Image (spheres, rainbow, N blue to C red):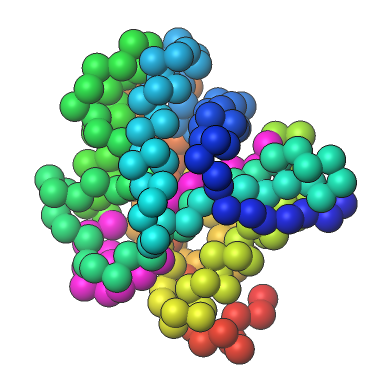
Amino acid sequence: MSYESTPLQFWEIDEYIKLRFDTFAASDGSLSAAFWPGGYNQSIHMFLRRGPEKDFSDPNDHVQLIRDIKTKAVIGAAQWEVNPMPPMNAQQEQPSSLPDVSLNVEGGNMLALNTFRTMQADCHQRIMEKQPHVYLGIMVVKPGYQGRGVGSFAMKWGVDLADRLGLPIYVEATLPGRRLYERWGFEVQETMPFDARVFGAPSKAEHYCMVRPARKADESAI
Ligand SMILES: CC(C)(COP(=O)(O)OP(=O)(O)OC[C@H]1O[C@@H](n2cnc3c(N)ncnc32)[C@H](O)[C@@H]1OP(=O)(O)O)[C@@H](O)C(=O)NCCC(=O)NCCS
């Protein structure tokens, strides 16, 4: 099977949000059970739309959709943010992939989301501190297409971007994400202290703060 990667268009945001939601909801050990215990609804959808809508015209924010070349079906997505400024402190930082959590969203556990987001910003700030870097905010492959190299195909776009810019890449990874990223030269710096069981999820949903050191384009082959 062959794939293609195209930049997200504004009218594709709904499909992108649903793909993200469904993929995480179907993944063992994801945060979905803690954040969205009642499953998908329209309020959650509108809430999750805010991030990509806000970032749509930001030239440093790149969402790439992955398609099956033959059917043109969207089977994956990745969001990369070129972050030339050091992350701010946890109170100030608003990672673009994670929208404002001061809202109340029907069916959402905003305390869980807010707690995770605070820990996420703490790790991001501490690990990357003053280094310009690329932030990998989202990586999803539709469940029926996983394990066929779609994730690796999506990685290549962002790794090439980082290598062209000579920047490291930072990500907070799930366990399946960690396996993929390790193959692309990322190393775990810390395990996030978040425990999703505190918020009623069946597993801890461990997340790993990982960095791929800066390389030049000609060193990027894996
Ligand atoms: C993490 C994720 C994006 C990986 O995507 P993927 O398309 O399955 O990734 P790949 O197919 O490139 O690699 C996955 C595995 O398939 C294997 N694989 C790759 N190409 C293959 C092929 N053509 N045939 C068979 N196996 C293949 C890889 O070796 C890899 O094996 P591993 O499990 O030992 O690491 C996907 O599992 C996912 O969306 N998970 C849920 C959401 C999530 O956790 N996202 C990460 C957030 S940080």
Query: Where residue 114 appears, x then y in whole percent?
Result: 24, 32
Query: Residue at coordinates 21% horizontally, 73% vertically from top-left?
Result: 130
Query: Residue at coordinates 87% horizontally, 51% vertically from top-left?
Result: 1
Query: Residue at coordinates 34% horizontally, 42% vertically from top-left?
Result: 54
| Residue 132: in magenta span | yes
Q: Is residue 172 visible?
A: no
Vertical order, 27 against 221 (above or below): above
Query: Residue at coordinates 81% horizontally, 50% vertically from top-left?
Result: 69
184, 77: nearer the viewer? 77
Vertical order, 209 against 102 (above or below): below
Image quarter hosting the C terminus: bottom right
Vertical order, 124 against 197 (above or below): below
128, 29: nearer the viewer? 128
Vertical order, 144 against 132 (above or below): above
Q: Horizontally, is 79 left or right of 123 in the view?
A: right
Q: Quadrant of residue 9?
A: top right
Q: Horizontally, is 178 left or right of 92 in the view?
A: right
Query: Where residue 219 appears, x then y in whole percent?
Result: 59, 87
Q: Horizontally, is 55 left or right of 215 in the view?
A: left
Q: Is residue 117 visible?
A: yes
Q: Horizontally, is 60 left or right of 14 in the view?
A: left
**Number of dots carrying numbers:** 0
Query: Where residue 94 appears, x then y in whole percent?
Result: 24, 46
Query: Where residue 40 appears, x then y in whole percent?
Result: 50, 16
| Residue 61: in magenta span | no
> Where does the magenta region start and end?
124-142
